[in-house]
Amino acid sequence: MSRPYILVVLAILVFASVGHAQPPREFRWAGDPEGGAPFVEADPAHPDKLVGFDVEIADLIARGLGRTPRFVLVAFDSIVQAVARGDADVGMSGIEDTPARRATMAPTIPYYEFREVLSVRDADAPRLRTLADFAGRRVGTLGSTIAYDILLRAERDYGLKAVSYDDDVHPYSDLILGRVDGVLLDNVLAERRHRVIHGFTVQPQSVAIGHYVGVLAAGNAPLRDAVNEILLRAMRDGTLERIFRKWNVWNDDQPALHAQLLAGLPVAPISGVDSGAKAANPANPQNPANPANLGNPANLASPWESARLYLPSLLRASVVTIVLSCLSMAMAIGLGVLIASGRVYGARPLRAALLGYVELMRGTPILLQLFVLYYGLAAAVRLPAFVAALLGLALNYAAYESEIYRGALEAVSTGQLEAARTLGLSELQVLTLVRGPQAFRLALAPMTNDFVAMLKDSSLVSVLTVMELTKQTQIFATNIGSWVIPGTLCAALYLAMSLPLAALARRLEQRWKAPTA
Amino acid sequence: MEGADRVNGNNFVLRLRDVHLRRGTRVVLSGVTFDVTRGALVAIMGPSGSGKTTVLRTIAGLEPFDAGRVAIDEVTLDGGAPVPAPTLRQLRRKVGFVFQFHHLFEHLTALKNVWLAPVHAHGVALPEAQHRARELLRALGVEHREQALPRELSGGEAQRVAIARALAVDPPLLLMDEPTASLDAARRGELGDLLRGLTGQNRTIVVATHDEEFARFCGARVLRMENGVVQ
């Protein structure tokens, strides 16, 4: 091949690769369709199609940018993190404007103003009107939200108990069931639920005013500015109003917000907060009533300072984790011994029933079992969250423990059993004096393994509103916008719990190897 | 029959009548019949697979059999039917068993192996049971190993602890499967002396062995087995 020819081929290749290097003309936006109406939800008529005002706003932005919209499914409390790591260009699913997000991300201008409102059972409506009325009572909300932060402050100021949910539907069903006495959430969500569930009242007085924004990675400011232009245009020409009217969420708050933005005036992320502001000096940066502190109690502090602020709640959550794990494991061991004994010594129908139980518990996700125990059975048995968590873990682990003990019982040699029988020991004595103790030594190592696994699986119970270590860490991380320090602290706390356990198990194994008198 | 009844009187501690046992298609015992008088030392001898161990296991109630009858004093086991639990309980008080591979309880010391059954199955007070266990271990020459776990014992030591364990519940009939298998010549001699001493105390001993010399040394009455029958 002659040299000029090679150069031509190279030039073509370079052009071709430059063509490929062009960013795909897609507008990737992240959202969570789970319980996401009227923001993002699967169309009831066409479940593979998404509908909602955030969907229409995303389409509007994509059109304005000349790109095709592509939806990226992300769990609600991970949307901001997903955008930060580049999984999507924009996160939009009723994302709240907070000082932390303004500091660590590049949020768009607010496109919707909402009110945090309290919902109470109809009978309580006359006496539970503001947060101050909830002393000693439980108030539920979605975790990792402004509403949750407001409730955490109100815990301190008014002595209520904040209960964190993973979704915005169960707080209202639990309100009707009496598991919580109030729900603090956006008016959009409260009104939507109110159309479906009856028996609760949305209090007219708002607890705070917030805004929905699209959120972009900090380095993506140019795209953010382009999006802002599109949003302003849609405010000016009434497109945004048409979208919100279509979804029944247009109200008198919106024209004022739009006017303020079109006039180029700044909008505070959060305002009008009701939270123990009575005696506090509003100028004090530590004052919870200072809107700058909301949505991020640590946003003014260094990472280490914020770690110090969060450490007590992380330690409290660790106590929940260890107590829950120890109690559940104790129950699982007791139940497991009974199941294993039944499977080794029981009559055929009992053996079949126990095998069925073991396969059911091992063959279905523990998350499903927890949901069924807490929400599914709520109409018949209204278990408190901690009890449901305890039972759920214990019932699930009992199946695994029973398999360990059954294997261990069957591993004790026939010779040992025959020797015991010829000495005149009864079958029960053979089990308790010879077979059981030998099987227990065999089972110790896999049991320790399961206990350590239980410590970590206990994080699943946060779906039942139990605030354990992982959930608390997630909230911490969402609020400060980084996983580095919260993740490290959380890992250290789990290790501080599991390592002594493993050491104890090793010591027990050593002791049982030594002669016993 | 009258004569037989007289012969089967109190002097006989053990009687087997036409015992048959089949495992699948394999005939293990095909009509075993013999009597053992109180205080006797009997050696069942024969090649491997002749059914020696199975005879001992049948007498101890560990092996269900198809036909025939086994009687230990007034306790009788009938072939072809499961042994009723009360009969089995009576049987366990009469028959002790020393297994070829000892089967000492792996999680307990030698001493506790010996006193476990007297305390839990026979209601002997713990201090008394421990005292007797130590005496037995001393008599068998392994008292210095009382705190050892079975896996720390030599074959011969484990054998002697297993004998002590069987003797601790004081059974009138003691069955031993290949008791010399893990013993050297000197220990075999000691064991022979011990067994003779035990029969002197009116205890009956049936040993399954292929150790001719040991049987002769003990002065045992020899029963020869071949192909599932006593010749």
Image (cartoon, coloured by chain):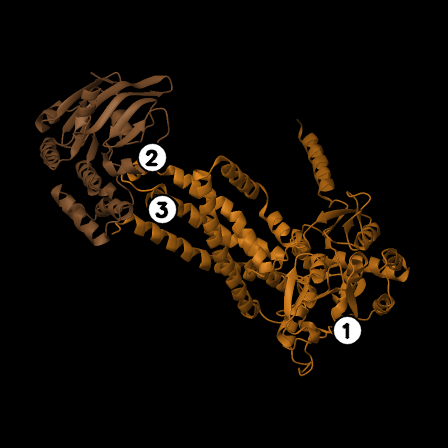
Q: Please report, as a chain letter, where disc 2 is located.
A: A
Q: Tell me the CA gap for discs 3 and 2.
A: 15 Å
Q: Colour of chain B?
A: brown
**Other residues around mark 1 within 10 Å, as few (<14) / some (14–19) / many (≥20):** few
Q: Position of residue A513 (x, y in %)?
A: 29, 48
* Residue with the most extreme front position: B2
Please count the marks in the image: 3
Q: Which chain is orange?
A: A
One can see residue A188 in this view:
yes
Q: Nearer the viewer, residue B167 or A378?
A: B167
Judged left or right of residue A371, residue A8 is: right
Q: Amino acid at mark 2?
A: Thr
Q: What residue sits right under mark 3 in the picture? A: A432
Q: Give SS at disc 2.
A: helix
Q: Position of residue A458 (x, y in %)?
A: 54, 54
Q: Please report, as a chain letter, where disc 3 is located.
A: A
Q: Nearer the viewer, residue A270 or A444?
A: A444
Q: What residue sits right under mark 1 in the picture? A: A126
Q: Is residue B220 above or below residue B159?
A: above
Judged left or right of residue A59, residue A88 is: left
Disc nearer the start of the sequence (2/1): 1
One can see residue A307 in this view:
no
Judged left or right of residue B67, residue A376 is: right
**Other residues around mark 3 within 10 Å, as few (<14) / some (14–19) / many (≥20):** few
Q: Position of residue A349 (x, y in %)?
A: 52, 36
**Other residues around mark 2 within 10 Å, as few (<14) / some (14–19) / many (≥20):** few
Q: What residue sits right under mark 2 in the picture? A: A414
Q: Position of residue A454 (x, y in %)?
A: 50, 52
Mark 3 vs mark 1, foreground winner is: 3
Marks 2 and 3: in contact by CB < 8 Å? no
